[in-house]
Image: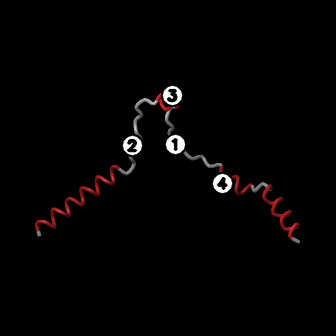
Amino acid sequence: MTRALLLILALSACAQFPEVDAGSRTNLPTPSLLPTDQLIAGVDQTAPADPLAGPVAALNARAAALRAQAAIQ
């Protein structure tokens, strides 16, 4: 009984599932990679731009405004 279950599991693990394969073939944008020449040479590399820099600056400005408003009251 156990051998039959293991055989079924082994065969189903090797089976192809078109629905799953179709979902993995999406056209997602690829991330920008650093050139390997710079990595090997160890030269100064520019850091990628922080995607949260704008929202963080806006939140800091809002917090400063709230602190200033609270100090007045």
Residue drawn at (34%, 49%) of the image: 53
Disc 2 from disc 1: Cα separation: 13 Å
Disc marking residue 31:
1
In the rendered image, residue 5, in percent from the top left (x then y), is placed at 84, 68
Disc 1 from disc 3: Cα separation: 18 Å
In the rendered image, residue 4, in percent from the top left (x then y), is placed at 88, 67
**Judging from the image, what secondary structure is the residue with disc 4 in?**
helix
In front here: 25 or 4?
A: 4
Looking at numbered disc 1 in the image, what kind of residue is underneath it?
Answer: Pro
In the rendered image, residue 26, in percent from the top left (x then y), is placed at 62, 49
Residue that numbered label 2 is attached to: 49
Residue drawn at (81%, 63%) of the image: 9
Q: How many residues crowd around disc 2 within 10 Å: few (fewer than 14), some, or many (20 or more)?
A: few
Marks 1, 4: nearer the viewer: 1
Marks 2, 3: nearer the viewer: 3
- Labelled pair 1, 4 in contact (Cβ < 8 Å): no
Q: Is residue 16 left or right of residue 59?
A: right
Residue drawn at (16%, 67%) of the image: 70
Comes first in the chain, label 2 or label 1: 1
Looking at numbered disc 2 in the image, what kind of residue is underneath it?
Answer: Ala
- Labelled pair 2, 4 in contact (Cβ < 8 Å): no
Q: Name which quarter of the figure residue 30 lies in.
A: top right
In the rendered image, residue 48, in percent from the top left (x then y), is placed at 42, 41
In front here: 14 or 17?
A: 14
Comes first in the chain, label 3 or label 4: 4
Marks 1, 3: nearer the viewer: 3
- Labelled pair 2, 1 in contact (Cβ < 8 Å): no
Residue that numbered label 3 is attached to: 37
